């Protein structure tokens, strides 16, 4: 079978190709396809496909590659979620989310600086990426672990050419970085990198060499653990060696929803994405927005109202190991019927909130999907929370560390930067995982996975994923058109309708205002990457042109 050309957003050599919003088209293949935020990840993934790797091998190597090339949202200092379907085994959920250090508690942040959960060592949760990538391979992989890590090791050792996004995101965090960030991500105190420069990360390569040989112990013990603990605590944190040594990946069962002729597999708590999307799919079935003209005022109005109602219950969720989530209440036929009956085609309406506290969440997340012709798939979302997370970078090895503690309710009753609402289920507790909007999703038809998708974007992840499912499965658009279509986002509070800053006709916006919506433009509403298996057996992959990305395979 001949190789298909990988549709890239940029070139490794010709840096002028780096550009936002270049036109993307679906990339087709018949064996296995990948949609990811980096051309390096696609190229490395294709190498592993050519070596006979399965979707777990490819997903692992893509994750390791992103940890080297995209440290602002996918470093080893972060965490994430994955939905996995391989062979005859049921769909499983891998939770490698960060956890709160043992010295934290519900009142931990009350006497600290207001930004203590966002910047510096007090913002850092125990990272999960190093454990997560290893567990994914251990449970489902086919090729030797050493082959997969070798790809990331070589990128760190020999270097890679920097993209425009890498430059922009790194420069944005310059004033936040600790000394480790400035040491590892700038040439020197007076000189910045520019697009096309080669970044060599020999300290990170040293860690990867050890990681290749002994697995997660290379991260959670020894010199790297010492580096992380000392760096975090020198910037005000309370991380301990015990915190790192005791980190465990958690395996969960997915939420499911039968939607028309499809079965949708969704993330359970501590992701809020699954329950919100499940609620929204139920409301779509009640209200049938597809009966309205495609991309019409009425259709967008109904989608907005569906999202508004679906986000209402998000405030009541938390880590299931610490909190009993009211799933039966939020998914009951009675409650869903009440939500559906509260929606009018004529005007927007707002219901009373179920909670009075606010949810925190940032946008610096990434998603990639791998799907093969047999319906084997991994949909995986990785995050640091903010841009470069806490802006704390380990001094010796150059590992950017998350600020995932800001996803907890750190100051009960106070609004956050996104105006999201949450309750006591998400208070800080030692060993707890914070609530998240990350929503890796798989869709099955006739017993085979036919759609694998997800997105970065904080709470807009949920809206982006839902609308791509709707456009693809209900409106029958190809996966690229479904992704690029203009989107809306409503998260219940604030009572505002967020819209893509491009793509909408003025008449549509005026019509939404007439229905009572307060419109606010956003640069993007989720950045969805997805792979779909069509009825004719052809795989199509696409990335979201609202950000950088790439798609490819065989």
Image: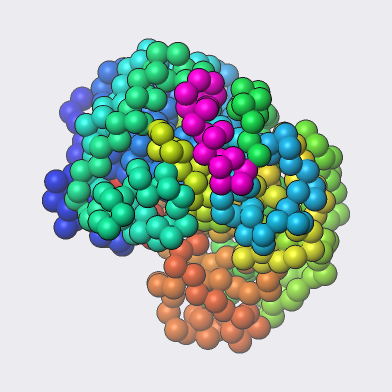
Q: Nearer the viewer, residue 187 or 137?
A: 187
Horizontal side of 334 relative to 358 (left or right) equals: right
**x and y, in percent, of residue 247 in the image:** 63, 26
Identify which residue, 2 or 529, lies in the foreground: 529
503 inside magenta stretch: no
Asked if residue 352 can be seen in this view, the reply is: yes
How has the structure been colored for display? rainbow
Residue 143 visible to an observer of this rendering: no
The image shows residue 214, relative to residue 98, as above or below, that is: above
- Number of numbered callouts drawn: 0
- The residue closer to the viewer here, 313 or 238, is 238
The residue lying at 79 percent from left, 70 percent from top is 351
Highlighted range, magenta: 219-237
Residue at (70, 50) in percent of width and height: 408
Residue 359 rendering spot, x and y as whole percentages = 70, 58
Q: Quadrant of the N terminus?
A: top left
Residue 462 rendering spot, x and y as whole percentages: 58, 54
Q: Looking at the image, which residue is at 17% across and 53% down?
A: 15
Relative to residue 330, is residue 133 depicted above or below? above
**In the image, residue 368 above or below residue 417:** above
Main SS of the magenta part reads helix
Q: Is residue 225 magenta?
A: yes
Q: Which corner quadrant of the image does residue 103 belong to?
A: top right
x and y, in percent, of residue 539 in the image: 35, 37
Horizontal side, residue 415 vs residue 95: left or right = right
Residue at image location 40% in from the left, 13% down from the top: 213
């Amino acid at each position: 079978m001949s190789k298909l050309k990988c549709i890239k957003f940029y070139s490794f050599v010709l840096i002028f190709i780096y550009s936002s919003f270049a036109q993307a088209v679906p990339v087709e293949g018949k064996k296995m396809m990948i949609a990811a935020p980096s051309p390096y990840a696609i190229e490395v993934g294709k190498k592993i496909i050519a070596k006979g790797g399965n979707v777990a091998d490819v997903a692992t190597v893509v994750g390791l590659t992103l940890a080297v090339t995209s440290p602002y949202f996918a470093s080893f200092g972060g965490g994430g979620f994955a939905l996995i379907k391989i062979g005859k085994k049921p769909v499983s959920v891998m939770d490698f989310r960060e956890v709160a250090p043992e010295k934290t508690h519900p009142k931990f942040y009350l006497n600290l600086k207001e930004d203590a959960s966002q910047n510096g060592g007090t913002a850092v949760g125990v990272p999960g990426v190093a454990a997560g990538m290893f567990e994914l391979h251990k449970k489902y992989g086919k090729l030797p672990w050493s082959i997969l890590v070798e790809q990331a090791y070589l990128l760190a050792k020999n270097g890679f050419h920097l993209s425009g996004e890498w430059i922009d995101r790194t420069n944005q965090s310059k004033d936040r970085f600790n000394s480790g960030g400035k040491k590892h991500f700038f040439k020197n105190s007076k000189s910045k990198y520019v697009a096309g420069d080669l970044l060599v990360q020999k300290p990170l390569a040293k860690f990867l060499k050890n990681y290749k040989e002994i697995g997660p112990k290379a991260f959670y013990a020894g010199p790297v653990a010492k580096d992380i603990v000392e760096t975090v605590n020198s910037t005000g944190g309370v991380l301990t060696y015990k915190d790192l040594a005791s980190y465990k990946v958690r395996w969960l069962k997915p939420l499911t929803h039968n939607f028309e002729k499809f079965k949708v597999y969704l993330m359970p708590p501590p992701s809020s994405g699954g329950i919100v999307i499940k609620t929204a799919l139920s409301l779509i079935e009640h209200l049938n927005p597809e009966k309205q003209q495609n991309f019409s005022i009425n259709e967008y109005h109904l989608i907005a109202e569906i999202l508004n109602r679906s986000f209402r219950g998000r405030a009541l969720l938390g880590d299931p190991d610490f909190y009993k989530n009211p799933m039966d209440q939020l998914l009951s036929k009675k409650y869903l019927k009440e939500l559906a009956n509260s929606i009018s085609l004529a005007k927007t309406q707002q219901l009373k909130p179920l909670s009075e506290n606010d949810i925190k969440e940032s946008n610096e997340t990434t998603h990639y999907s791998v799907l093969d012709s047999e319906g084997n798939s991994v949909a995986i979302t990785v995050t640091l929370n903010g841009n470069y997370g806490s802006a704390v970078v380990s001094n010796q090895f150059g590992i950017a560390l998350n600020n995932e503690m800001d996803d907890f309710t750190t100051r009960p009753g106070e609004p956050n930067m996104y105006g999201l609402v949450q309750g006591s289920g998400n208070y800080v507790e030692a060993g707890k995982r914070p609530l998240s909007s990350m929503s890796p999703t798989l869709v099955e038809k006739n017993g085979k996975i036919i759609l694998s998708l997800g997105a970065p974007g904080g709470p807009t992840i949920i809206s982006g994923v839902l609308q791509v499912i709707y456009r693809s499965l209900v409106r029958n658009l190809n996966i690229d058109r479904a992704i690029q279509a203009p989107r809306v986002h409503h998260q219940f509070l604030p009572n505002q309708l967020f819209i893509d800053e491009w793509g909408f006709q003025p008449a549509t916006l005026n019509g939404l205002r007439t229905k009572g919506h307060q419109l606010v433009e956003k640069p993007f509403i989720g950045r969805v990457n997805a792979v779909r298996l069509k009825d004719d057996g052809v795989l199509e992959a696409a990335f979201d042109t609202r950000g950088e990305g790439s798609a490819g395979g065989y």
